[in-house]
Image (cartoon, rainbow, N blue to C red):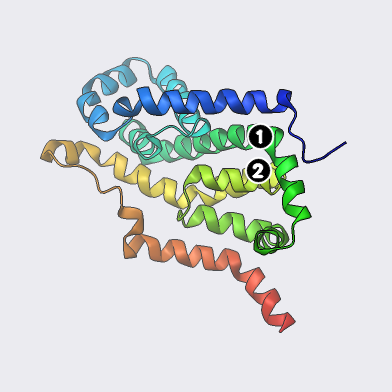
Amino acid sequence: MDRTHFPAKRLLPLALFLLVAVLGAVFLREHLNFDALRENRQALLAFRDANLLFSVLLFILAYVAIVAFSLPGAAVASLTGGFLFGLFPGAVFNVTAATMGAIIIFSVVRAGLAEGLKARIDATDGTVKRLSDGIRQNEVPVLLTMRLVPVLPFFVTNLIAAILGVGLVRFVWTTFVGIIPGGVVYTWVGAGLGEVFARGESPDLGIIFEPHVLGPLLGLALLALLPVLLRRFVKV
């Protein structure tokens, strides 16, 4: 059987995901932004106070859906987690929900496209093949680095891992561990939104690229890549 063939039954779930993602991007964009959070903050706080456990469950499910369908508003969702539940347990809810959403889209893409695309990449002999081989040989350091330093969009990292055939267990733990620092930063910003709202200001969503934040993240990324660098040094 041709390994590069994409059976329709495998592509159907992915097609449905893409349809929901497009519809969500079109119809939910105005409802998944910071302005919506600011306008509905009092209602959200009141609902949380009256239904704490249900609020936690509803928040996690909404965050999972945002990540799984690559909908706009992931950063705002992280802020909301901090705003509603504080740094702790807000950070736990944010990181857990983001990881769960990543698992869903990773599994759907891997089931629908990964096998065929991986076979096509392996059949080539060029830059893409060499890059693919390099990532596969250093999966854990590369995955952790991509999570720690969010240069690539979150969903792109999920797609890369799925297409390259990363194991599910390895994908899960590197995702969970790798997004903790960034997740804590955004949750912390969200936890201080009360004061930001009181001043009539907007939060600095680019804070993760500030030197005092990006520096430690780069340090962690370098630490994650240390085994790769040492292997290359020893070979030389």
- In the image, taking residue 162 as reference, residue 115 lies left or right, namely right
Q: Nearer the viewer, residue 202 or 177?
A: 202
Q: Quadrant of residue 194?
A: top left
Tell me if residue 163 comes above or below residue 33 in the rendering. below
- At horizontal 13% and vertical 36% (from top left) the residue drawn is 198
Q: Is residue 212 above or below residue 155?
A: below
- Left or right: residue 72 versus residue 129 is left
What mark, if any, has residue 61 been given in the picture?
Answer: none
Looking at this rendering, what residue extends furthest in the bottom direction? Answer: 236
Question: Which residue lies at the image location 53% right of the left edge and 46% below the top edge?
Answer: 156
Q: Earlier in the sequence, mark 2 or mark 1?
A: 1
Position of residue 227 in the picture relative to residue 153 (left or right): right
Residue 138, given in percent of the width and then of the height, sits at 68, 61
On the image, the x and y values in percent for residue 66 come to 45, 30
Q: Which residue is mark 1?
A: 107
**Badge 2: how crowded within 10 Å, few (<14), some, or many (20+)?**
many
Please provide percent x and percent y for residue 230: 66, 76
Q: State the CA–CA distance, disc 2 to disc 1.
A: 7 Å
Quadrant in the picture for residue 24 = top left
Picture disc at residue 162: 2
* Mark 2 residue element: helix
Amino acid residing under circle 1? Ser
Picture quarter with the C terminus: bottom right
- Pointer 2 and pointer 1: residues touching (CB < 8 Å)? yes
Q: Residue at x 49, y 45 (%)?
A: 154
Q: How many marks?
A: 2
Provide the secondary structure element on which disc 1 rests. Answer: helix
